Amino acid sequence: MVQYYLRDFSDQDIPTLVAILNAIWPDEPTTVAQQEHWERTYPADNPRLRRVAVAENGQVLGYGECQRPFWSSRRDSYEVFVAVNPSWQRCGIGQALLAAVMPLAREQGICKLRTSCKEDADSAIRFLERAGFRQIGIRFESALDLTAFDETPFLSIQERVTAAGYEVITLAQARAEDPDADRHLYDVYAATIVDVPFPGEDRANPSYNDFRAALDSPQSSPDAIFIARQQGKMVGMTSLELLPNGIAITGMTGVLREHRGRGVATALKLASFRYLRAKGYRETRAHNDTANPPILALNQRLGYRRLPGWLVWEKVLGN
Ligand SMILES: CC(C)(COP(=O)(O)OP(=O)(O)OC[C@H]1O[C@@H](n2cnc3c(N)ncnc32)[C@H](O)[C@@H]1OP(=O)(O)O)[C@@H](O)C(=O)NCCC(=O)NCCS
């Protein structure tokens, strides 16, 4: 049996945490620079409790956290997350970390916890069931093979969008013309992200600070954020996260209500695919909720294939 103890997380643990996360999810790797960025930009007053499990030789074996979900509009549950180095799973470490971080919710007067795990992660599913969580939803994930993508069938949509007076530019181009481009883009983002359904009746709680943190992240680039404009006004956007392994993830695609149903999102996505192909990316991914038919239909038409999704879980805390 492995001997370990729990202590608070510190910034020095970031490289080990990154190694653990990348061992668990190798196809969507994170980096030390990315995690250090999230540390620097984390909302200072947000309740959060973090612990690591450490072996006697000092090696960090696992990580646990409980926090108020500042990105969400839900107020009655906290988010928990536990990850254990695959070589040290099934030794009770996950259970110990979860037990150590859960009390934060109760201390803050919250009696529900939420978390998520991959649909094909049998150990995580067993772990969460054993810990008293029940599944409340799933968020689909899908991937498009950019090396095989043919835009020809979509060019007529693109022409229709151009004929209707829309143009697609990058954030870098928008910034060159307008010192307030980031603010204007945020207005489109904030007006559209609240329409995205998340599992468990969840909705986003947009804030300019969180939006800025994502814009300034090492995985973001002003050349990889595409904006639709009509008569000089921003009306839609799609953003990309650029991973170090040739895979990109669409962060958010949104079109203002009065401009929907005209092919604007398709034109934005085509522009993003062109950029990715020119930069040598081989795959782009999307994380969409099951209850979001318009974007699922759009992605299906573009040729995305389904990957294992993210199951969302909830636990009601006892007295
Ligand atoms: C989920 C995870 C954190 C569990 O960590 P762990 O240290 O291996 O879990 P524990 O050893 O504390 O397991 C506690 C109980 O969960 C269940 N369990 C965990 N892994 C299991 C597996 N592979 N098969 C069957 N049951 C399992 C068992 O009931 C186990 O108790 P037992 O060993 O006495 O039977 C780990 O698998 C992981 O890091 N997964 C990836 C990250 C993730 O998806 N996190 C889930 C969201 S919080």
Image (cartoon, rainbow, N blue to C red):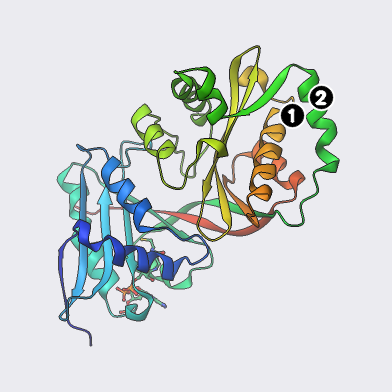
149 in relation to 124, above or below: above
Question: Disc 1 versus disc 2: distance between alpha carbons?
Answer: 8 Å
Image position, residue 255 (x, y; %): 61, 26
Looking at the image, which residue is at 17% across and 82% down? 3
Label 2 sits on residue: 160
Q: Nearer the viewer, mark 1 or mark 2?
A: 2
Image position, residue 277 (x, y; %): 68, 50
Which quarter of the figure has residue 151? top right
Q: Is mark 2 within 8 Å of ligand 1?
A: no
**Few, some or many C-alpha atoms within 10 Å of disc 1 (few <14, some 14-19, many ≥20)?**
some
Amino acid identity at mark 2: Arg
Q: Is residue 296 visible?
A: no
Image position, residue 286 (x, y; %): 59, 48
SS label for mark 1 = loop
Looking at the rendering, in which quadrant would you find the N terminus? bottom left
Q: Is residue 117 visible?
A: yes
Amino acid identity at mark 1: Gly
Tags 1 and 2 in contact by the CB under 8 Å rule? yes
Label 1 sits on residue: 263
